[in-house]
Image (cartoon, rainbow, N blue to C red):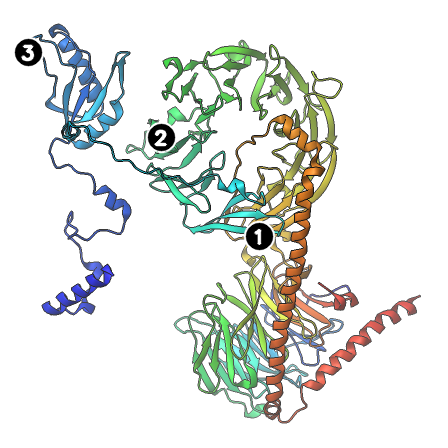
Amino acid sequence: MRPILMKGHERPLTYLKYNKDGDLLFSCAKDHTPTLWFADNGERLGTYRGHNGAVWCCDVSRDSMRLITGSADQTAKLWNVQTGAQLYTFNFDSPARSVDFSVGDKLVVITTDPFMELTSAIHVKRIAGDHTEQTSDSVLTLKGPQGRINRAVWGPLNRTIISAGEDAVIRIWDSETGKLLKEADKEIGHKKTITSLSKSADGSHFLTGSLDKSAKLWDSRTLTLIKTYVTERPVNAVTMSPLLDHVVLGGGQDASAVTTTDHRAGKFEAKFFDKILQEEIGGVKGHFGPINALAFNPDGKSFSSGGEDGYVRIHHFDPDYFNIKI
Amino acid sequence: MGDVMVMNEIEATASRLGIDQSQIDLDSIRLPPGDNFGIISDDEDVYEDDQLEFDSGFGNIIVVGNLPVVTKEKFEKLEGVIRKIYSQIGVIIDDGLWMPVDPQTHKTLGYCFIEYNTPQEAELAKEKTNGYKLDKAHIFAVNMFDDFDRFMKVPDEWGLPEFKPYMPGDNLQQWLTDEKARDQFVIRAGSDTEVLWNDARHLKPEPVYKRTYWTESFVQWSPLGTYLATVHRQGAAVWGGADTFNRLMRYAHPQVKLIDFSPGEKYLVTYSSHEPSNPRDANRVVINIYDVRTGKIMRDFRGSADEFAVGGTGGVASWPIFRWGGGKDKYFAKLGKNMISVYETETFSLIDKKSLKVENVMDFSWSPTDPILSLYVPELGGGNQPARVSLIQIPGKEELRQKNLFSVSDCKMYWQSSGDYLAVNVDRYTKTKKSTYTGFELFRIKERDIPIEVLELDNKNDKIIAFAWEPKGHRFAVIHGDSPRPDVSFYSMRTAHNTGRVSKLTTLKGKQANALFWSPSGHFIVLAGLKGFNGQLEFYNVDELETMATAEHFMATDIEWDPTGRYVATAVTSVHEMENGFNVWSFNGKLLYRTLKDHFFQFLWRPRPPSFLTPEKEEEIAKNLKKYSKKYEAEDQDVSMLLSEQEREKRKMLKDEWEKWVNEWKLLHEEEKLERQGLRDGEASDEEEEYKAKDIEVEEVLDVTEGGSSFR
């Protein structure tokens, strides 16, 4: 089917997120306003105004009532999804890079960048049932390892936090004590900055994408490397189908080098791989710049991609897609 | 073990002296220069340097023998000559030249002693003048004085020399006996250099040997594939062996930049260029010619870069400076100012002791098979003297054929690989001198009197973009026309009904090509659009005049046929940042496999020596190919069966493995269900949702058909 092109952002996209029911799509970009779309037809529902810097990440609660966004303006904000009202602002001393609600939406993990003298950090905050009682006290703060943490998410049953970033090492932390539990083996792990991390629907495994031109699939509990998908260009975004055994990698050449080459050279395609056989099965072209964000609709029948070119594209699969055999 | 002993001793000594070892910064310790306290450096080269000895104190004296025996009257003259020769090399100390005289006859004894300031000068003088020809009868024999001592100690009694048992060397051509008749290639990516088999049947390369930091700049196969040469700061080295790669020989040449093998791989030419001490001078060039097997320097050339830059552009010499010719590594020649210097390898000296004088010669090239040179001289005297192309026979230096050409702007010479034909691409000025047009002069070398034929393109204003002879054949291909979509034409030097005339076979209009790559066995050609054309490839059969396949290797920079003409490799080297790696294709344009490697620098097929089969036998095989190929077809089929079997098994294994993970996850998920529900304040279980998703899928399919029918 023809993809739906959504031109709502002025600047490169940074993150895409579907709500649990798969009817809403949230998009974040380097312009300051996260935007909400109908996931089915791409109609714009509204924007969330209030940030004063690039918005790097967002997450939506299971009941689709609350949205949390992390921004380069050194805040993470809590929003009312329906009204677009700001409910609360968490202030930090450095840009907030990633946000993730826990199972049950009572906790949130926020990472902040290394900035000036500060190192990167992972903060765990409690989300109050009633937003008027919300405080900015941290339940737990982890002083991060070297370099930026690009993504931190909750492990199974909120017992652990999985982080990955510039130092190319994936770490699992105890979310109660803050102790480092596991670290990915340097030999088998990524060789360059990990740009993205995406959990499976049940949280049992997750996929990481890296500038070393590969994506890797890991077990969430044991941090065992299960699969490696090798591609031709740096990977900026990853996602996996909740329905079929497919993973999607997006990326392209570094944004700074894009203008110097033919758009074909950049390979700004979303590449589909067979999750089990690790073989490439197809690609979806369209963006005029690297792909920065990818998200699968929870129903597995469409996915969306956001590019450096400022477009969000929603792709509904043709029926043929569900019959791919390799 | 040794290290442990030493460490123990050190520790014992330290504790005796009351020194806390952890407080000592080992790097801050400096040994007095020249003393190593008996600790041998790990660095092999340093160790070797230490072997030089200068203990006797006569290290700066040389003895020159084989001098003419002269009478008293001529003594002064001879001394003058010797002094002149040897003071060029270094400073002879006062009274440092002593030529003994027979007290009875008052004649010299035919030798003299020369003392230099330093042993280095003496060493240099020995190297430079040993074998110096004063005249026919007197070839200098120069030795170090210290060596004489050594030679004198040789016992007078003859002892039976020790018999060394014959050690058969490695079969350096083992790779040619590969059972599957595969070819090897070398690739260089990042800091790794790797030799691989091209296993086209299994659609992947099979590793042979890999080494990190094998070379410091590049690698190169010798022309017959026996050796792989690596280039380092200290010199070059060649590697080879039966199943692995061992270092066979090293050639010390500091800061070597370029290397070149003679076509029969008997000699290796190395080149380096050094910054002069005075910035106004030209760079100093050192060229050594080694015997590949013994590692001995056969001849060296030193001089300012200007001398070697003739024919090159911008003061940079065009490599190779010495071009080999005449078959069997017999001659090598260098372009000089108004001359061509031709050397022979028997004596490593100029033929007839003088260079071939040719006023204003611009370029020359050897016939690939015969000792024939072709050379090009541009117009002189403002057009009064025509430009010419001559063929010169070596070593006689007779002119075999000459062709005068008028209003020429440039000439390029292309020899056909078996030396049958020479094509000269001549750019001429039009009458107004504002533009040029192109023609070809075709020489038939092997025919009587070497007839010349002139060929002009249909549209003679077309620019020539590329030209290539069919190897071992009689056809050639030309890319001509304007850049975005030039034409490609094929010509034959003989056709069925007319063997003496060139004729056009066909012209392909508007091809995206700028380079031609003939198969080494002829018949097939790849028309490639490299660089600006993004790697367009067209595999063309010249026998049938039809395109076999068109393909693209995006951004490809290099193309090379394997030596048998069965496969083509296309590579994207690190001139581009993205897409680095190589593809291997069959001769008819089927992509067999692709490999991606970051920082990819080189792809080189290992050359093969020429086949021992006679042309008749080759023809017979070509005719009865069916008979011969049967065996291989059966093998191919076996392999493909095996492959699909393996593939199936591999897939099954992967599926099973995955299944195991999924089951484990399901189990854990189930176990954690209650806890998770607790976290969600007892909200509905996740399993329910999964069913929902499946329902929707069915719905979707129906939607599509419905939509279609209602539209009608």
Q: Amino acid at mark 1?
A: Thr
Find residue A20 and report its image quarter: bottom right
The answer to whether residue B402 shows anywhere in this view is yes
Mark 1 to mark 2 CA distance (whole Å): 38 Å
Q: Circle 3: is it few (<14), some (14-19), or many (20+) Cα within 10 Å?
A: few
Amino acid carrying mark 3 in the image? Pro
Say whether disc 1 or disc 2 marks the residue closer to the N-terminus: 2
What residue did someone put label 2 on? Answer: B288
**In this figure, which residue is indicated by the disc labeled 1?**
B595
Which quadrant holds the N terminus of chain B?
bottom left
Q: Is residue B561 above or below residue B390?
A: below
Residue located at (57% from left, 88% from top): A106
Q: In this view of the protein, can residue B192 be seen by the observer?
A: no
The numbered disc on residue B103 is: 3
- Of residues B352 and B191, the one nearer the viewer is B352
Q: Which residue reaches farthest front? A: B160
Which element type, helix, strand or loop, lies under badge 3?
loop
Image point 42% across, 26% down: which residue? Answer: B309
